[in-house]
Amino acid sequence: MFESAVVVPGLETPHGEAAEVEVLNLTKRFGDFVALDDVSIHVAAGSFHALLGENGAGKSTLVKCLIGYQPADTGSVSVDRRERNISSPREAAALGIGMVFQHFTLAPNLSVAENLLLAQPRLPALLDWKRERAALEAMLAEMPFRVRLDALAGELAAGEKQKVEIIKQLYLKRRFIILDEPTSVLTPGEADELLGYLQTRTQAGKLTVLMITHKFREVMRFADAVTVLRRGKHVAGAKVSETDPQRLAVAMMGAEDAQPKLATPVESGHAAGAEVWQVSALTVIGDRGVPAVDKATFSVRAGEIVGVAGVSGNGQRELVEALLGQRRILGGAVSIDGKPYRQRRHEMQALGVRSLPEEPLRNACVGEMSVADNMALRSFDKAPLARGPWLRPKALAEQARSMIEHFGVRTPGPGAPIASLSGGNVQRAVLARELSEGTQGPVRVLIVANPVFGLDFRAVAAIHARLRAARDAGCAVLLVSEDLDELMELSDRLLVMHAGQIAYACPRAGADVATLGRYMAGETHA
Amino acid sequence: MTIDAITAVLLAMLGGAIRVSTPFLFVSLGETITEKAGRINLGLEGTLVMGAMSAYAASLHSGSPWLGVLAAAGAGAVFGLLHGLLASLRRVNDIALGIALMLLGTGLAFYWGKAYIQPQAPTLSAFHLGAWSDSPALRSALDINPLFIAGLLLAFALHWAFANTRIGLTLRLVGDSEAAARAAGAAVIPTRIAATVLGGALAGVGGAFLSLFYPGSWNEGLSNGQGIMAVALVIFARWQPRRCVLAALMFGAAGAIGPALQSVGISSGYYLFNAAPYALTLLLMALTCSRDTSLKGAPGELSLNR
């Protein structure tokens, strides 16, 4: 059904310029699980090739095999039409192939210049800083973006780190760069700047780019060719000029799954009610001893979802931790229904405060305890789950069975340790506990952070539906997310956090992604 | 107290600071190297005592105190190697291992050192930089021991090497981010082992100072936890060699308060003043390590960071 090879004519490869890479019939198994099933792709020299797919589709496995991070079971890799046996990233580097990983590989206490220098394969025993600096500055002068060479890498914002990672690859004169979701921590403006620069390099025939992504916008705007993987199989390959997001989405998710994702956001059928909670001038200290949340003031009404957008590292995590009682509040106040809320357990019970923090296994569960016990964490000490000082195991098990059924949690049983569940099912289990009213009283306030991070499409849809249902039932929801699409889809109002402050607020209906991006980047001050 | 007495106390504190700080300086520089590479070696107290014993024994048998210093460095390197190798095994915690090696080091040193408590070994002699002065207090304060000068030079050399040599930069990279080090093709484990060996050797030299210069004899109460305090001092010095000098001098001066006061005839509270370095350790730790701020400047791979 497809033609994978997209050869741009006239770009035969002189050495030192863009490299051509072809992967043939790659298969990789982990036990019984087939992560890659006979996948072939051809990335032409000087092309910008996008690799699309849902989580678990095999994108990362493919590129890891390609750069020698893990061996493939069968299949071959050719670079510039010569078959190569690449068994380590070092050998890939020797061929001019480099990769920017999703998790940064910068040493936080070293300066940017030191980090760049250390990437060189052959470093002289004594460093001539004058010469090295001049070389670095000369290289940076050719790029459209600035980085501070003397800043410690750990002090950079995520977007700056991503730039340094890419600069590092260019500094090493790579001819083929693999990017693993490079824009997940960038604002739309930053993403355009970076990808735009790489695009000019590819168009000049200096570089070939293979980019893992799940953003159609980036594929359509920057890539020449696209390959779609689904469940380890190559399901589509095309020139970008000959396809469209609809067709790619269908290929990515399978026809029957694609509909809901492409559906337009559902408006909440009713107007929001009274203000349920107020946060005024909230200040929270971050890990580095300076305020991470700086006098944040906002309110959330009953029956609305307020989305908090922002590039990660601008205080969202600290805000959520403070609201959940995981982090000390330095100044300001939070009140719910006019009553002060100081993040105590009895207050959460009395005021109906529930939460779905990010990484729920770490932040909302006790991993070694059973699913049933975890589901009872909020109410195990009250009737009907307890009688006096005694727990009632039957009541616990019964509650767990009911929650498991209602929320579709896939678990070996209520007695299984919750850490043995998959990410999506941990999320469902926590959501079941947080949204069930049975033994715990009504849910008035819900605090949610990056609820679908790392989940597959089906789990995402289910969790989004739950959040909407909670909103429609009159709950006041605060949704913190790094995914702008998710916020646009779910929120009734949007806040943008930048440098610990609420930089911008607007109703979703009038929201414009470009404006939000500017506030996320801190380019405008309200 | 008269002006003269105050001058005498201050001079005695200066001399004492230089004397007492030397082992702190060596141990903290050694620990800085080890921690910059991402490991914590709490066993340096044992290494220090072992170094003191080996130095004294080697000096006694060979007649040369400098051979004693060399022997101490060798003994320290062996202990460093032991820590470096064992901490490289999977699921071995470097801190717990360090405590075990601290006990092993002191225990072995006491066991082998029984024979050296009585005999008098040749000790290191000082540079008499105060010979021009006719004030005995100043002269004694300016009797600078050669190891202090070596330590001072070493601190500046390390500061330079961490920023300007491939080895220094690689060491910091390995200690700061294992992922980044692997991506850059650095040999993580060998670098850490080498850094621990070097750290152990320097701690051994610190021990040699105790038995061969001040107090200049071997006995079991020689160290009194100076090795442990020096490790704490590294945190206070924020892993910077030049700040280690400052911190060591401060600890040295605090340790010299008691003897300095005694030298002018104030002996009440002698033991209280001798506790000054320990109190200072507590105070500095309380001031510099608060709950809300993570340890700024700490190498990223240290287990106290994870």
Image (cartoon, coloured by chain):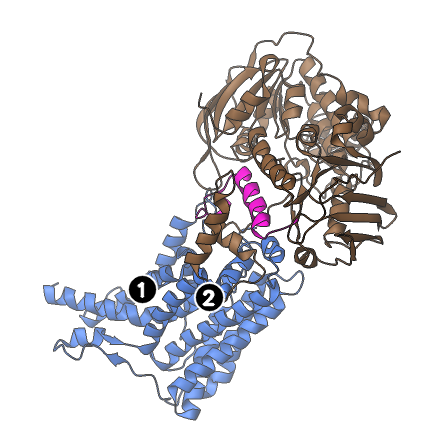
Chain colours: A brown, B blue
Mark 2 vs mark 1: give the one in front.
2
The residue drawn where x is 51% and y is 33% is A314
Whether discs 2 and 1 lie on one chain: the answer is: no
Dominant secondary structure of the residues highlighted in magenta in the image = helix
Q: Is residue A130 above or below residue B118?
A: above
Residue picked out by circle 1? B249
Is any atom of residue B140 visible in this view?
Answer: yes
Q: Position of residue A205 (x, y in %)?
A: 65, 43
Regarding mark 1 in the picture, which secondary structure is present there?
A: helix
Span colored in magenta: A148-175
Q: Type of residue at label 1?
A: Leu
Looking at the picture, tell me which residue is in the foreground, B21 or A114.
A114
In the image, residue A162 lies in the stretch drawn in magenta: yes
Q: Quadrant of the N terminus of chain A?
A: top right
Side (left or right) of B242 relative to B35? left
Regarding mark 2 in the picture, which secondary structure is present there?
A: loop
Q: Which residue in the rendered view is the most extreme toward the front?
A: A10
Side (left or right) of A152 relative to A357? left
Side (left or right) of B18 relative to B118? left
Residue picked out by circle 2? A126
Q: Is residue A35 above or below residue A96?
A: above
Q: Which residue in the rendered view is the most extreme toward the bottom?
A: B62
Q: Is residue A121 above or below residue A473?
A: below
Looking at the picture, tell me which residue is in the foreground, A509 or B278.
A509
**Chain holding disc 1:** B
In the image, residue B126 lies in the stretch drawn in magenta: no
Q: Quadrant for residue B7, please give it.
A: bottom left
The residue drawn where x is 75% and y is 54% is A70
Q: Label 2: how many residues lie within 10 Å, few (<14), some (14-19) or many (20+)?
A: few
